[in-house]
Amino acid sequence: MVAKTSELLKQFSPGRILLPVVLGLGIVGYTLYGEWVKSDLPMGEVLDRFAWTSRSVFWIALALLMMMLRDFGYMWQLRILTDRKLEWRTCLEIILLWDFFAAVSPSMVGGAAVAVFMLVKEQISIGRSTAIVFTTVFLDQVFYTSLPFFASLFVPQADIFAPLHYIRSELLGTSMMVGFWVAWGGLVVYLILLIAALFVAPHWINWWLTRLLMLRMFRFWRSRGLHMVNDLLTASRDLRDRKSIFWFQVWVATSLAWIGRYLVLNCVLAAFSPVPMTLFDHLLAIGRQAVLWIVMVLSPTPGSAGVAELGFSWLFRDFAPAGVALGLAILWRLISYYPYLIIGVPVMTRWVKRVYGSDVRQPRIGID
């Protein structure tokens, strides 16, 4: 799971950074133009519906604060998981870079390998670093696989899933409802495997997965797979004896991060909603957003570029003024996604200079 420095720095090429931006905005721009043509409305009228008022400014400012809350939650989580060996500034650098690598990678890939690499370079042992990353992945999986059903305790499930019944995705070739259940089922299987490998039967899972990877059909993934299997066993040894207070604290930090992440979208909707959103509306938006995050897992594009924006416009069209759903989707991503692409380069430059004593832009990239 540990990357080499040269592989890490390749991620900062202009092409890797521009690809998700161009791809996401290209898909959205094409769809936005098609919807505008079909609506047969003058551009001036469409823009009038996207008017900024004191209310919209307040909610967008609150959305920015929610992003800060989200990053603080992950910083606090990392401080707990490292037994407070890392300073707050170091935690912030790692979180920002972790988000950068997640932004330039498909959703299923994320930035886990890079996170282990950075933690090791911060003098955290490889076993502890592996345990930290797997714990973060495990807690995230628990949160967003259970949230759609937790939300249904307060909002009728039919209202949460209603838009998916009528949307046909050209990307998936079928109903988005099918796409959701495929993604959710895969995440649940992965979560069950993580629970078994980390807490229930780590040695048995290690033995079973090792034998499975030795089959001829998995020869292309064998080397990487065996590394991950061993990493799981290492992480299990670190995590199984942790006390209840540790798990309580890390779960509170994780929940804080995800609450901040979810409320960003709610704030964007509230900023331009034709009528003020009620508590029920906010709960409904959270439920649908939980569905959106799971559907985004299916995306093969870096950072779910394009799929996230289109999914937003499909699921939240009834919250937005007519004709501006995709515009709100772009605004949501401008707050919650694209900044990490911009911040990543200077933060990485600073981090490499601090760790190696040289600039990331200089040719000393052969260090492992």
Image (spheres, rainbow, N blue to C red):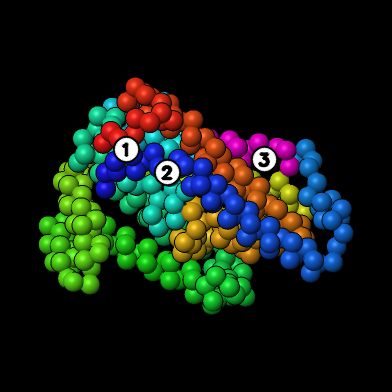
Q: Disc 1 and disc 2: Cα gap in Å? A: 10 Å
Asked whether residue 255 is drawn in magenta, I would say no
- Residue at 37 percent across and 24 percent down: it is 358
In the depicted structure, whether residue 346 falls above or below residue 291: above
According to the picture, the residue beneath numbered tag 3 turns out to be 60
- Residue at 62 percent across and 44 percent down: it is 334
Give how far across and how far down residue 176 sits, in percent: 54, 71
Tell whether label 3 touches label 2 (CB within 8 Å). Answer: no
Q: Given this view, does label 2 or label 3 mark the residue nearer the observer?
A: 2
Disc 3 crowd, CA 10 A, few/some/many (<14, 14-19, 20+): many
313 left or right of 245?
A: right
Tell me the SS state at disc 1.
helix
Q: What amino acid type is highlighted by mark number 1?
A: Thr
Give how far across and how far down residue 158 sits, in percent: 57, 71
Q: What amino acid type is highlighted by mark number 2?
A: Gln
Q: Given this view, does label 3 or label 1 mark the residue nearer the observer?
A: 1
Compare residues 355 and 266 and report the one nearer the observer.
Answer: 355
Q: Work out whether mark 2 precedes mark 3 in sequence or the reverse, and give the earlier one.
A: 2
Disc 2 crowd, CA 10 A, few/some/many (<14, 14-19, 20+): some
Q: Give the quadrant of the C terminus.
A: top left
According to the picture, the residue beneath numbered tag 2 turns out to be 11
Asked whether residue 57 is drawn in magenta, I would say yes
**Magenta-tinted stretch:** 56-69
Compare residues 250 and 353 and report the one nearer the observer.
Answer: 353
Tell me the SS state at disc 2.
loop
Query: Does the magenta stretch mainly form a helix, a strand or a loop?
Result: helix
Give how far across and how far down residue 227 sits, in percent: 20, 53
Q: Disc 3 and disc 1: Cα gap in Å? A: 38 Å
Residue 337's tag is: none
Q: What amino acid type is highlighted by mark number 3?
A: Ile
